[in-house]
Image (tube, rainbow, N blue to C red):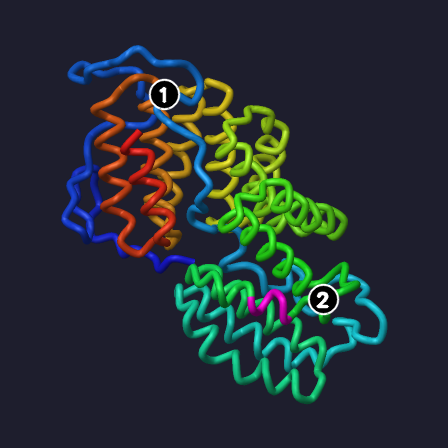
Amino acid sequence: MPRTLLRTGTGPHEENRAGCRRPDNGFASSASSGSDKRMPAAGRGAGRVSRTGMRWLLLFAAMLFVSACGGVDAGKGTGSDKEANADKDTIAFYAAHINRHIYSGRQDSVIIEMTPHFYRALSVRDTVVCRLLGVSIAQAWLELENRDSVSRYTELMRPYMAGVEDGSAFIIYHNVLGSYALKYQADYTGALTHYLKVLDYAKKQEIIPAQIGMLYNIIYIFYIREDPHCEQYAEEALTLSKYPGVSFFTRIAALIAKTESAYLNGSYDEASRYLHQAHEESRWSTTPAESIVYMLKGDIFAAQGFTIKAAQSYEMALCESSNSELSTVINILYNYGT
């Protein structure tokens, strides 16, 4: 997950760390523009071409290892390697360390600290610990955009994950496989298959953050394919986000998903309203969502024909992307250029 951007101002005109001045072009009133040169909109998807890159993986970055998302008691386990029968203190130890690094955006620390423990687990055939650490390291490499390392660890984990149909390792493993298929192979069908596996399991286990994370990913596939038939998924994510105890991460994910769905269906005012809510959530939380929010804002303005406001939004997205994934920056530049 990208490192968080520290906010230094409190108002709509403050400068961020990159020295970029925020424009006064609000979300909710996107249709009002006295000074903007409005060009005729070309219909849904105007100003944007389908992309194959992957943007900020909000997904599970700060939630996968807590008990609410599976933990050591998730599922019935498989064979003799039930997570429920594993050494819970050992799993809790690793979970705490991994969570601390993830919350701080230190994916490299996950790799550095957990790799020796992973190979030690391999050497003593501690299958449960091996699964959890192996897929966690793979996810960390995914966030760091090291394609070869992701591929190496997912292949290494394949025999250990064969037949596993529940638990936290199952969630992370298929999340990584789906994201790898989408990010590096443009394999929409493959990505969707993995995401739906996790979604189905999360529904059965009533794991709300995991459900929202997968719905978010699924809707993004519709978004880059410019397919508007995702409204049901977006409504489901939004409904789940209203449950008590849902974190900033999951609420913002649901709001962004709803924004993308509304955008795809040509409901630009509705998309702007939900994006405004996502922006308000992200401004005062530690979630590094602002580069994505401004990019989507630029997409909405471009589709409406507000070229100047679209350009301002893409510029702000770039200003907010100093700690984002490279692919996020590429997506912003791509959208800006079209």
Is residue 18 found inside the magenta-colored segment of the image? no
**Residue 168: % across, % down:** 66, 63
Q: Secondary structure beneath disc 1?
A: helix
Horizontal relation, residue 76 to residue 28: left or right: right
**Residue appearing at x 14%, y 49% in the figure:** 19
Disc 1 residue type (three-letter): Ala
In the rendered image, residue 49, in percent from the top left (x then y), is placed at 41, 29
x, y percentage for residue 301?
A: 32, 24
- Magenta region: 152-156
**Under tag 2, what secondary structure?**
helix
User: At 71% across and 63% down in the image, what residue appears?
Assistant: 167
Residue occupying the point 27% across, 36% down: 314
Q: Could you tell me which quadrant the C terminus lies in?
A: top left
Q: Which residue is mark 1?
A: 303
The answer to whether residue 302 is left or right of residue 227 is left
Seen from the viewer's position, the closer of residues 220 and 28 is: 220
> Is tag 2's residue or tag 1's residue first in the polypeptide sequence?
2
**Label 2 sits on what residue type?**
Met
**236 left or right, relative to 318:** right
**Residue receiving disc 2:** 161
Name of the residue lying farthest toward the right: 79
**Is 153 included in the stretch rendered in magenta?**
yes
How far, Cα to Cα, is label 2 from label 1?
Answer: 44 Å
Q: Nearer the viewer, residue 158 or 328?
A: 158
Dominant secondary structure of the residues highlighted in magenta in the image: helix
Left or right: where does residue 7 sit relative to residue 204? left
